[in-house]
Amino acid sequence: MALPLLESMRPLKAAAGLPNSTPTRMAFVYIPNGAIMEKWTPTGLGSEFELNAIIEPLRPVKNDLLVISGLAHDKARANGDGAGDHARASATFLTGCQARKTNGADISVGVSVDQLAAAKIGRFTRLPSLELGCDRGRQAGNCDSGYSCAYSYNISWKSPSTPLPAEVDPRSVFERLFSNGAIGESKERRAQRERYQKSILDFVLDDARQLQGKLGHTDRRKLDEYLTAVREIEERIQRAEKFAAVPEKLNLTKPNGIPDSYEEHIRLMYDLIALAFQTDSTRVASFILSHDGSNRPYPFLGVSEGHHDLSHHGGDQAKQEKIAKINRFHIEQYGYFVQKLKSIREGEGTLLDHSMIVYGSGIADGNRHTHHDLPVLLAGGGGGAIKTGRHVRYEKDTPMSNLFLSMLEIAGAPAPRIGDSTGVLKQLG
């Protein structure tokens, strides 16, 4: 079972020839259907900025944020290919490339930034990258005006023709992170755990006690906090599974392990990313909250209409207010994640200090399907390379790929270019 990075491990890492500095992590969070930009974009620039209504829930972590305006994804535009902005938005988001318009097997777009990073720094971790989502995806068929469903449901691409589908079941993610990877043994242990209703931690409790006796005070505290966090998440997953197993009045079958609550589902996934980073199980993650073009309703927010339908508001104020509610809900979950990372001590700082967490969409105005001046946030200090607590506006149509190129350089995985990038972004540090 993976452990958090303890102070006592640093000499061992050096002896093994591994980098002894605190690693830099990166995660990419995707929201669908754009945002109401008038309620998103802050007033003021630099450190003298005020959070607007939609991103106001991030006030507790304002100084840990870089709000970025002016970035664009030109390759999400039609460029002669006609309709299909939603499929192009998600396919282009992390690749910066134009997706080939096809609903057949000849899909092609580009390698995504997370996979460029995983190819270089993934060798230092057990999992090169982690791809998560909250929608069960489709990998074939026509999902948007002649574009394959593979474009609509994936933001991570290992090669131009190979998407990496997002895992949506928290139980499966947990098993990937905390099983020992041995074929047969993992299934056997899981069956035993379910049969006796034991926690995975029960199998390592004795070893953990022995380890705690050999650690200093700080490491013992970190190990105890970590084990408590793991048990808490596993218990939440078990509760979600039990609740999902109860038939509804309509006797609908629910996916095993996925909570009924969308908010709880999102937060479980965020918690699992935090644990993956804390244990250095991976340093790269992507999370698609919902596919672009999603028509999910949000009745718990008082929004019974579908998200995509509302995004074509035609200037209707009431519809825009409902979209803003959805946007703010997504921001609240992101704020939960950022504060979670900030609460985890690591070295001389926090896990957030050593991370770069991008949040955004491939569409700005969902009504007109615009792909410029995108809603983009970057949380975390990138190991000291990023100066947060600011609102930065770049020249119109600056490629968003330039941000990704900069992040690769900061993470120690430099690339000559990515998609339509023209160079690294200035003003990050």
Image (cartoon, rainbow, N blue to C red):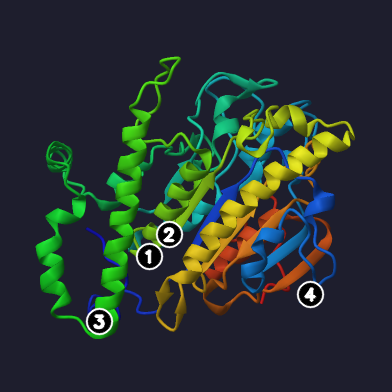
Is disc 1 in contact with disc 2, using a CB cutoff of under 8 Å? yes
Position of the C terminus by quadrant: bottom right
Q: Is residue 389 left or right of residue 198?
A: right
Q: Is residue 414 visible?
A: no
Residue drawn at (68%, 72%) of the image: 428
Q: Earlier in the sequence, mark 4 or mark 1?
A: 4
Residue drawn at (70%, 27%) of the image: 305
Q: Is residue 174 above or below residue 160?
A: below
Tell me the distance, in whole angstroms, between the alpha carbons under discs 4 and 1: 31 Å
The numbered mark at residue 46 is 4
The numbered mark at residue 274 is 2
Place of residue 243 in the rendered image (x, y in percent of width and height, measured from the top left): 36, 33
On the image, numbered disc 1 is attached to which residue? 278
Q: In the depicted view, which residue is nearer to us: 420 or 112?
A: 112
Is disc 4 in contact with disc 2, using a CB cutoff of under 8 Å? no
Identity of the amino acid at label 1? Gln
Residue drawn at (81%, 34%) of the image: 319
Q: Earlier in the sequence, mark 1 or mark 3?
A: 3
- Where is residue 427, by image quadrant? bottom right
- Where is residue 408, by image quadrant? bottom right
At label 4, counting other C-alpha atoms closer than 10 Å, the crowd grade (few under 14, some 14-19, many 20 or more) is some
Tell me the distance, in whole angstroms, between the alpha carbons under discs 1 and 3: 15 Å
Is disc 4 in contact with disc 1, using a CB cutoff of under 8 Å? no
Residue drawn at (50%, 26%) of the image: 139
Tell me the distance, in whole angstroms, between the alpha carbons under discs 1 and 2: 6 Å
The numbered mark at residue 8 is 3
Q: Of helix, strand and loop, which one carries label 1?
A: helix
Is disc 1 in contact with disc 3, using a CB cutoff of under 8 Å? no
The numbered mark at residue 429 is none
Q: Earlier in the sequence, mark 4 or mark 3?
A: 3
Q: Of helix, strand and loop, which one carries label 2?
A: helix
